[in-house]
Each structure stands twice: as structure tokens, then as C-alpha cells.
Image (cartoon, grey):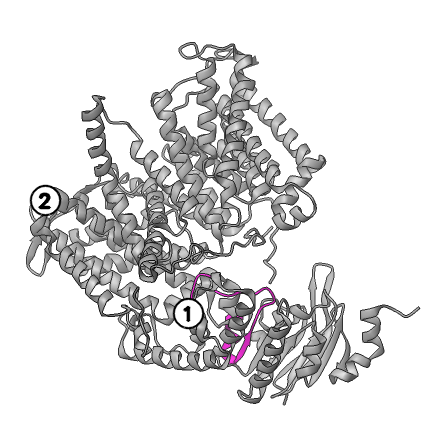
């Protein structure tokens, strides 16, 4: 059984069809990339999986659960974490606090035990901190631990967002344009991290990305989209050589 | 006949609410800030005009004082934007709200200092004149209020939907950065809008002080005008006027047909009902933030 | 220059950074506990007032400072707590039970109010709460059989562990009662902020979408925040009633709501310190003004007649100055000064600089 399955998913905004009868599945342990020109509906697919939008038709299943039955805040509980195209961090909190929010889905305490900060609340905080420190080590964020997000450079924010998603301990990580706006070196780092996330942590990665170098470097399979529909699906080399993809990117050869 | 009389005086009150609400909406449309001091602008406009025209102050001719006070209020609005509001560019809406509430306090304080705390009436050529239709007796002030308000709202509506500057102002509000890239002088446009809001407030103040009396706390009426703006949907000029009229009419009728105390309650109860069931006003559609 | 080396996670989890900081706070606690023996009754009364405002400020801070939901209607919950407390006492419930119950009931009312209010964002929420605050004034008049209407009610002396306390005959005891409540609420608040719930408030404040993606139920979190905020505000209201000894519908007018919000903005949004700093400004500004007016009158021979609205005028100007020049409030300024000393001589001017976003729009239409 695949980890994530989309089956004939369609989404319409008024008269505009943003996602058109799209089906694909992501297997456990792979890095799966979605590429396509602007407005192809890539981020919309992420927002559908995050349940920010209700599809007009179709099914979305994750790990045997029907995702369409849960609230947006329930998606994380199944082990799906994500980043955002325009970075949605908690601006007026420290990096550490941001990552600790990522641990929220593992919360065992309740209102009262937190107000009195009972030993169990304290124990939970220690455990959360340990998990978060592992991720800080993994992504080399030690220098920024106590810094406010509002003062951080763009490249670091991108990494913090990945770190926060990892802190939730996900099975599936959705990366929305992880390399956009990054320098060449930062993109190379990101590439190794994505590779490590899959290999060392065993987390399946689904990403939307424009940088074809990054895509062909790390992904096992690539889905090319245009106008909300599937153009081609296969290995990076296959997709790049696919005539429909070339046409969508370069226009019809005259 | 009695009901008709109530309706007319309610409509006249509603026009003043509507004009203040218009000021809110103007600023909100163009800068996305909410000016909680708009009611105090109105009060200040009234006092400036009184100061210019009433015999115990400067005693200028009425028709000379009008453009002068409007000009002064426009200048005040412009300067306020230039030196205070513009620094809030990019800050959260809530900070601007709190800032303008504080501004209202300050305006109220200075108005009290200069003109005292006694209610005063604007001396005007229409005072005391009446218009009779059969058994119906209308104060000329009430008629003037309704006519002026309708004309002003219509003019602003045309300005925003037809003229180039008006459209530029709308563009500036919807996406400041994009408007800037498109060559719209965002800052100057914002200044103009605040000046315009000052003028509208001044007109409201003149009408208000002509048909009743004004004291420094009259600015608190802005809260009621706020209810009007929200009921009308906050983004639309005709909506603001409609909201104002609804609030103006509902007050006398509530106190007549339910109980005296309810004229205070009715507008806010309606406001809450609208916010709960139609959070974006009676006349609008809703869209969701895009991620 | 002082540097704290961290060697243990507990250093971040416990509320104080190091022994130095802990001893400062303990010193402050000792100072406020012995205050009744140092101050005369008038200033003790003023200090009590400041503490009550601080509790109310803490209540609003949870909602506005940490969850990002601006309320211009918290006077309604002050009123609710006040009336609930007195009505329970008059019904024969002992104060030690009536007081926490008043908080609890107000909290529940807050949750009920939150359910429709949750659908509103930013300015709309502020307007709705403002309207609510205005309505409560009228509702108190209309529900005269319970509230005494315009005539109001009088607060009796209350029994705390066998000691009868009221504001006039036992000001010291009343001060300690208020102080105890302040300390308990503050400790609870600190605990909350270092636990998941407090962080989820901050998450909702800063980005609702990503809070959701992290598994935080935004509506539920807001409702809890509303409830906690109102409960604490209700406690402050109960104390305010006892402090005022007589109160009616006008005691908790909409102006109080506005003042409360402005207070925490001046103090510094998003910090516990901010509630206290703001309360000090609110509490001592009238005293300060009357003293300085006398001084001006004595030096320049001017009259000392009261200028109506002066307090609010000055207050407004202070607030405008803060929003323009120090949006983080007194606490923000305090942090900068402290950091300057700690890092001396390495402080840089742009250390607290924030990036502004020009693209963000809160408008949905």
C-alpha cells in the first residue's frame, strides 16, 4: 500500500479548475517531486493534503486513513508535516520555541497540569527539548537557538521551517519550494539535508520545486503538472525528456 | 404621520452616522487602517467651524467659514498621515486601531481645552426654518443633512469607481507593494485619502452641529458610526451610508416601540447579530486568505 | 558584561535564567510583601489598585499579547466577575469559594462568547467586543433585580481564613489578599508560557495556517485563551468591586475596556512584565499629574483648577509616543537597556530590529 494516495482529485475556485482529476501516489521512503510552471496547481495540491481546501471531487488517503475525514489540525496527528512557500514561521518567538511548537502533536499534558507545571509536564518538556536538540544538531542551527525569527536572514528561516516540520516526527514531509530564494551553497546544503532526511530519518519526502538541479539530484520520481493536470510521471530523466513537458516549458517548437 | 416624522429625523441622524462611517470606509479602503478617531475628527470639524463662524468666536460669514474649515481639516488629515500614520506602514492593523483610539483621546482633550465642555450649536442661515408638506413639518436642517449626505456619497462613489485617481487609491489598498511597482505613488495617495477623510468628517461635523449641539464627547458617537460601517460591510461607500441610515432609523423606533432604554442597545445588538451571522456586512461576499 | 552559559535544559525550562535573576525577583517579592509597613494607607491603596489592574492586564495579555486577539471589551468581564462574586457572597457562599467561582464562571462565559467571536478576525473582533462592552452597561441596568441597576451594589467585608477584610478598615490585609492573587496568577501564567499550551497561543498569534499544520486546533486554542483570559479578568473584577466598595453599571464602562487594552500596549504586548509596567503607568499617572500640577501652580502661580480630560489626553499622547517609537512598550525599552548593560560595550543599534512586512494583508476581501 502506498503511503499517500490521491485519487481523481478535482478542485475548483469559482469557474477556475485549479486541480483537474489528479491521481498519483507516493511510496514509503521515496523522495517525490512535483514540478510545473507557475499556476500549475502544485502548491494547491499541498494545501489539499493539508486540508486547507476541500476538494470538489476525489479521494485523499494517507497511511490507510481517509484524510478528507479529518480537520486541518488533525492532519499532523497522522504524521504529515509541511513547510510553506512564503515561510510561515512564528515571527515573534525564538527558533527553539518554533521547534517546540512542532512537538505539539505529542502533547500528553492538559490545561491543569501545565498551569501547575506538574512533574509530568516537566518531564514532557525535557523530552521535547531532547528531540528538538537532535534536530538542531542535524540541521546545524545551534547558533540561532535563542534568536527571534524576526531578526533571522531568509536562508536560515527556510532551514528553521524544515526543522520545525521535522520536530513533529513526521512520516511524510511536504516541502513547498525548499530551495526558492536560496543561494547556490544553501541549495546544495538543502539537497544533502533532503537526502539525509530520507536516508537517516526514514522520512518520505514530497516536494514542490522549480530548481531542476535539486529535483534531479534527490528525487526518485517526478510528477510534472500543467493547468492542474498530470503531464508526465517517472524518473527525473524520463520526465525531463517527455515531449509534453518540454512543450509546456518551452512552448511548441515551430 | 408620527411614524413618518420619526423616520425623517432618524434618517437625518443616520446621515451623520453614515458620513462618519464613510470616513472609516474611505481610509479602510485605501490604507487598510481603521481610524477609530473618525468620530473625533467629526467633532473637531464641528468645533473648527463653530470657532470660525460663531459670533462669540471669530464671527466669519458662514459661507466663507465652510471652505476654510474643510481646508483646515483636510490639512490636519494630511499632516496626520504624513507624520503619524505613515510611520505605521507595515505594522499590524491592531496597532493602528490602538493608535487612532489614543489619537481620539488627544483630540478630545485639546478640543475641550480650546472650546470648553459645554454643548454648542453652529450658527447657520438655515437655523429655525421649517418646511411644511401638508401635515408634515420638517426642519430645514434635517432636509439639508439628507441632501448633502446623498450628494457627497454619490460623488465619492463616482470618484472611486470612475476616475483614475480613485482607482489608483483602491489599487494602493489592495496590495501596497504591487501598487508601488505599478507606478502608483502609494504614499501621496494615502495622504490624499486622509485629507479627504478629514473633509468628509468636517462635513459631518458641520451638519451635526447645525442640527443639534456638539461637545467634545460627541466624538464617541463614532462608535455608533462604526456599527454603521460594519453593518454596511466596511468595504463599500454606499454600504456605509445604508448602514448609517439603518442605525439612525432603528434608534428612535426601538425607543418608541420597545422601551426607552433600547434605543441605546438596538444598534449594537444589530451590530453583534451582523458580525455573528454575516461577518462581512449585509452587502458583501467573502474570500479566504491564500497561502 | 554578563554571560549565562547553559549546561542543562532545565535552565531554559525553569522561569529564571540564573541565580542572579532569581535573587532579584525574590528581593522584589520581599519588598512588596513588607510594603504595608513602609507605605501610608493612601499609597498602599494606590499600590493595591495597581496590582488589581495588573491582574486584569495579565488577563487581557493572555488573549491580546499572546494569542493576538485584540479585545476592546474586557470591562464586560471585569463587571461579570465583580457581580458574580458579590451575588454569590450575598447568597451565602463564603468568599473563599465565591471568589474562585466568580473567576470560573467568568471564564465559562468567556468561552461561550468566544464561540461566535472566533469567526472574527483583527479589527472585527475588536469592534464586536467593543459593542459587547457597551451592551453590558445597559444589560446591568436592565437586570436590576440581580445587579441593583443604576443604584448599584455595595461590597461587604469578606472572610479570608477567619479574618474579616475590607478595603477601608483593613487596608493592609486587603493589600496582601490582592498580592497573593497577583502572585498566584503570575506563577500560573509563567507556567503556561513554558508549556505546550502557551506556545500554541503564540503560534496562533503569529501564523494561524502553520499552527494548523503543526496540529494545533486554532478555534479550540482561541477558545481556551479566551476562557483563561476572562477567568483572570473576572478575578480582577471581583477584587475591583471589593476595592471600589460601591459600584454600578458605570463602574465598568467601555472606557475601562479601552484603558485596559492601552495599558498593556504601553507596558509591552506579549510579556508578563508588560502587564505590570502598564498597570504602574495607569495607577500612578493621576497621582503624578496632580502632583506636577500643584508644582506648576506653585512655581508659576497658575491656578490649580482641574482640567477635565487631562488624564486621558496625556495618556493618549504617551500611548502614541510608544506606538511610534517603542512598539514593544516599556518592557521592550527595558530589554534594550538591560541588553546594553549586559553586552557592554558590544551593543549594536540594530540588535532588536525587526523586519517589516509590506505585503501582508489582513483583509479578506
Image-quadrant location for residue C2: bottom left
- Compute the Cα span from label 2 to label 1: 44 Å
Residue B128 x %, y %: 48, 11
- The image shows residue C214, relative to residue B55, as above or below, that is below
Seen from the viewer's position, the closer of residues B29 and C127 is: B29
For the point 27% across and 79% down, the residue is A119
Q: In this image, C196 relative to B1: left or right? A: left
Q: Looking at the image, which is closer to me, B54 or C121?
A: B54
- Is residue A170 something that shows in the picture? yes
Q: Secondary structure at mark 1?
A: helix
- Mark 1, Cα crowd under 10 Å, few <14 / some 14-19 / many 20+, is many
Is residue C299 covered in magenta? no
| Along the viewing direction, whichever of C295 and B97 lies nearer the viewer | C295
Residue shown at 57% from the left, 79% from the top = A173
- Residue B2 visible in the picture: no
Coordinates of residue B212 in the picture (x, y in percent): 44, 20
Quadrant (top left/top right/bottom left/bottom right) for the N terminus of chain C: bottom left
The residue wearing badge 1 is: A97
Q: Is residue A134 above or below residue C302?
A: below
Instruction: Check disc 2 and report the residue beneath it.
Output: C41
Q: Is residue C343 left or right of residue B39?
A: left
Find the magenta span and give its range: A72-95
State yes or no: discs 2 and 1 in contact (Cβ < 8 Å). no
Q: Is residue A87 magenta?
A: yes
Callout 1: residue from which chain?
A
> Where does residue C110 sit, x and y in percent of width and height?
35, 56
Q: Residue C150: x percent and y percent?
A: 25, 37
- Residue B154 versus residue C70 in the image, above or below: above
The structure residue drawn at horizontal position 63% and vertical position 72%, both measured from the top left corner, is: A179
Counting the numbered discs, the total is: 2
Identify the subunit bearing mark 2. Answer: C
Amino acid at each position: 500500500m502506498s503511503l499517500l494516495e490521491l485519487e481523481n482529485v478535482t478542485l475548483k475556485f469559482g469557474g477556475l479548475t485549479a486541480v483537474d482529476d489528479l491521481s498519483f501516489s507516493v511510496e514509503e521512503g521515496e523522495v517525490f517531486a512535483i514540478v510545473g510552471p507557475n499556476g500549475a496547481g502544485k502548491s494547491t495540491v499541498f494545501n489539499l493534503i493539508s486540508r486547507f481546501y476541500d476538494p470538489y471531487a476525489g479521494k485523499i488517503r494517507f497511511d490507510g486513513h481517509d484524510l478528507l475525514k479529518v480537520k486541518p489540525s488533525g492532519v499532523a496527528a497522522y504524521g504529515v508535516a509541511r513547510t510553506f512557500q512564503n515561510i510561515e514561521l512564528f515571527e515573534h518567538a525564538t527558533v527553539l520555541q518554533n521547534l517546540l511548537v512542532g512537538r505539539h502533536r505529542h502533547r500528553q499534558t492538559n490545561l491543569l497540569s501545565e498551569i501547575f507545571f506538574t512533574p509530568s509536564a516537566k518531564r514532557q518538556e525535557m523530552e521535547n527539548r531532547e528531540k528538538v536538540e537532535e534536530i538542531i544538531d542535524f540541521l546545524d542551527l545551534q547558533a540561532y537557538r535563542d534568536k527571534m525569527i524576526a531578526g533571522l536572514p531568509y536562508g536560515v528561516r527556510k532551514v528553521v521551517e524544515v526543522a520545525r516540520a521535522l520536530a513533529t516526527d513526521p512520516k511524510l514531509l511536504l516541502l513547498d519550494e525548499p530551495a526558492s530564494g536560496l543561494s547556490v551553497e544553501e541549495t546544495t546544503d538543502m539537497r544533502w539535508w533532503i537526502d539525509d532526511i530520507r536516508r537517516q530519518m526514514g522520512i518520505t519526502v514530497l516536494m514542490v520545486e522549480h530548481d531542476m538541479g535539486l529535483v534531479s539530484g534527490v528525487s526518485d520520481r517526478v510528477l510534472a503538472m500543467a493547468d492542474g493536470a498530470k503531464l508526465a510521471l517517472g524518473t527525473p530523466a524520463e520526465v525531463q525528456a517527455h515531449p509534453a513537458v518540454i512543450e509546456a516549458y518551452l512552448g511548441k517548437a515551430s | 404621520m408620527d411614524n413618518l416624522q420619526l423616520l425623517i429625523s432618524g434618517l437625518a441622524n443616520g446621515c451623520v452616522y453614515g458620513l462618519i462611517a464613510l470616513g472609516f470606509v474611505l481610509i479602510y479602503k485605501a490604507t487598510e487602517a481603521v481610524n477609530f478617531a473618525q468620530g473625533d475628527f467629526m467633532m473637531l470639524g464641528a468645533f473648527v467651524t463653530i470657532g470660525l463662524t460663531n459670533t462669540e468666536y471669530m464671527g466669519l460669514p458662514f459661507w466663507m467659514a465652510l471652505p476654510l474649515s474643510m481646508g483646515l481639516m483636510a490639512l490636519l488629515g494630511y499632516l496626520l498621515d504624513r507624520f503619524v500614520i505613515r510611520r505605521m506602514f507595515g505594522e499590524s492593523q491592531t496597532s493602528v486601531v490602538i493608535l487612532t483610539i489614543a489619537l481620539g483621546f488627544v483630540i478630545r482633550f485639546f478640543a475641550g481645552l480650546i472650546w470648553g465642555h459645554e454643548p454648542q450649536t453652529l450658527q447657520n442661515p438655515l437655523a429655525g426654518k421649517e418646511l411644511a408638506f401638508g401635515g408634515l413639518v420638517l426642519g430645514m436642517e434635517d432636509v439639508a443633512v439628507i441632501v448633502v449626505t446623498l450628494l457627497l456619497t454619490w460623488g465619492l462613489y463616482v470618484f472611486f469607481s470612475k476616475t483614475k485617481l480613485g482607482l489608483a487609491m483602491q489599487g494602493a489598498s489592495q496590495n501596497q507593494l504591487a501598487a508601488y511597482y505599478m507606478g502608483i505613488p502609494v504614499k501621496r495617495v494615502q495622504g490624499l485619502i486622509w485629507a479627504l477623510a478629514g473633509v468628509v468628517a468636517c462635513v459631518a461635523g458641520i451638519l451635526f452641529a447645525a442640527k443639534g449641539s456638539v461637545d467634545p464627547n460627541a466624538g464617541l458617537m463614532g462608535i455608533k458610526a462604526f456599527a454603521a460601517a460594519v453593518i454596511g460591510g466596511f468595504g463599500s461607500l454606499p454600504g456605509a451610508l445604508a448602514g448609517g441610515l439603518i442605525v439612525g432609523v432603528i434608534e428612535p423606533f426601538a425607543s418608541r416601540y420597545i422601551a426607552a432604554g433600547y434605543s441605546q442597545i438596538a444598534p449594537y445588538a444589530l451590530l453583534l447579530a451582523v458580525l455573528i451571522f454575516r461577518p462581512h456586512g449585509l452587502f458583501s461576499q467573502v474570500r479566504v486568505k491564500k497561502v | 558584561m554578563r554571560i549565562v552559559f547553559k549546561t542543562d535544559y532545565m535552565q531554559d525550562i525553569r522561569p529564571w535564567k540564573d541565580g542572579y535573576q532569581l535573587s532579584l525577583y525574590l528581593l522584589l517579592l520581599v519588598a512588596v510583601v513588607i510594603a504595608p509597613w513602609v507605605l501610608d494607607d493612601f499609597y498602599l491603596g494606590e499600590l493595591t489598585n495597581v496590582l488589581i489592574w495588573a491582574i486584569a492586564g495579565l488577563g487581557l495579555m493572555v488573549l491580546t499579547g499572546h494569542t493576538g486577539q485584540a479585545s476592546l471589551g474586557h470591562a464586560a468581564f471585569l463587571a461579570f466577575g465583580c457581580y458574580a462574586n458579590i451575588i454569590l457572597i450575598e447568597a451565602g457562599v463564603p468568599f473563599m469559594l465565591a471568589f474562585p467561582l466568580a473567576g470560573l464562571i467568568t471564564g465559562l462565559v468567556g468561552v461561550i462568547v468566544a464561540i461566535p467571536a472566533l469567526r472574527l478576525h483583527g479589527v472585527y473582533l475588536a469592534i464586536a467586543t467593543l459593542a459587547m462592552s457597551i451592551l453590558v452597561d445597559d444589560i446591568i441596568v436592565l437586570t436590576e433585580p440581580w445587579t441593583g441597576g443604576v443604584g448599584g451594589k455595595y461590597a461587604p467585608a469578606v472572610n479570608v481564613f477567619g479574618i474579616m477584610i475590607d478595603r477601608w478598615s483593613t487596608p493592609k490585609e486587603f493589600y496582601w489578599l490582592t498580592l497573593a492573587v497577583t502572585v498566584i496568577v503570575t506563577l500560573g501564567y509563567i507556567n503556561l508560557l513554558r508549556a505546550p499550551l502557551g506556545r500554541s497561543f503564540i503560534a496562533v498569534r503569529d501564523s494561524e495556517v502553520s499552527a494548523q499544520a503543526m496540529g494545533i486546533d486554532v478555534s479550540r486554542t482561541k477558545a481556551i485563551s479566551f476562557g483563561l483570559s476572562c477567568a483572570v479578568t473576572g478575578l480582577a473584577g471581583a477584587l475591583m468591586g471589593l476595592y471600589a466598595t460601591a459600584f454600578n453599571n458605570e463602574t465598568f464602562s467601555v472606557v475601562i475596556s479601552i484603558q485596559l487594552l492601552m495599558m498593556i500596549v504601553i507596558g509591552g504586548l506579549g510579556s508578563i512584565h508588560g502587564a505590570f509596567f502598564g498597570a504602574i503607568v495607569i495607577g500612578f499617572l493621576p497621582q503624578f499629574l496632580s502632583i506636577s500640577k500643584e508644582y506648576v501652580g506653585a512655581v508659576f502661580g497658575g491656578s490649580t483648577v482641574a482640567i477635565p480630560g487631562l488624564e486621558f489626553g496625556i495618556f493618549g499622547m504617551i500611548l502614541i509616543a510608544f506606538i511610534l517609537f517603542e512598539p514593544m512598550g516599556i518592557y521592550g525599552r527595558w530589554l534594550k537597556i538591560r541588553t546594553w548593560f549586559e553586552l557592554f560595550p558590544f551593543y549594536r543599534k540594530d540588535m532588536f530590529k525587526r523586519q517589516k512586512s509590506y505585503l501582508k494583508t489582513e483583509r479578506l476581501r
